[in-house]
Amino acid sequence: MISSAIQALGFDQGFVLTGNPTNAKEFADSFKLVVGVDEVNSAILSDDLSGLKITWNEIQAKIAELQAAEPLRLLREKRNRLLVESDWTGASDTALTSEQQSAWRLYRQHLRDLPNTAVPTLDDNGQLAGVTWPARP
């Protein structure tokens, strides 16, 4: 999650992060900048963080922001997959009756509405919870 937070903060230089730091000192000890490559294409690392414009507090704040957004991100990911799986129902050459087409339109509308109507959470295993998914027609 720390690497994701660093990237989300716009840091686009190569880096290596070892371990799972829990404070600023541990972060400084485990974060290395990639400053080049040697003749065998291995990364050349530097522990000089004097030019680093990201603080540990900013990283922690971004981690909290990403964690808070994760349930909705997962909801949208699954919702989008379900919409793609049902795209065929909107084609004009399907053998669906008008009643079936209406049922599929309603299903798809419920899926599109979920980000505004559901209150998703994550369970203890990090799985999406708290969402009542519409039944497929």
Image (cartoon, rainbow, N blue to C red):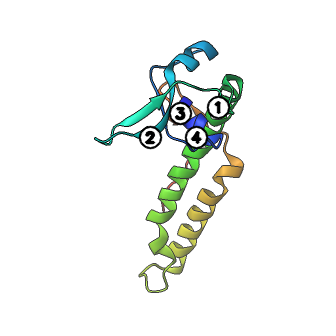
Disc tally is: 4
Image coords of residue 126 (percent x, y): 50, 30
Within 10 Å of disc 4 (Cα), the crowding (few <14, some 14-19, many 20+) is: some
Task: Tell me which residue sits at (35%, 39%) in the image.
Answer: 38
Foreground of the two, 117 or 122: 122
The three-letter code of the residue at mark 2 reads Gly
Within 10 Å of disc 3 (Cα), the crowding (few <14, some 14-19, many 20+) is: some
Mark linked to residue 36: 2
The quadrant where residue 9 appears: top right
Residue at the left extreme?
40
Residue 71 appears in the figure: no
Within 10 Å of disc 2 (Cα), the crowding (few <14, some 14-19, many 20+) is: few
Left or right: residue 91 versus residue 109 is left
Image coords of residue 128 (percent x, y): 53, 37
The quadrant where residue 11 appears: top right
Q: Which residue is mark 1?
A: 52
Q: Marks 3/1: CA distance?
A: 14 Å
Of callouts 4 and 2, the N-terminal one: 4
Q: Marks 1/4: CA distance?
A: 13 Å
Residue 47 appears in the figure: yes
> Which of the two discs, 1 and 2, sits closer to the camera?
2
Which secondary structure lies at badge 1? loop
Given contact means CB atoms under 8 Å apart, are the residues at marks 4 and 3 in contact? yes
Which secondary structure lies at badge 2? strand
Left or right: residue 41 versus residue 51 is left
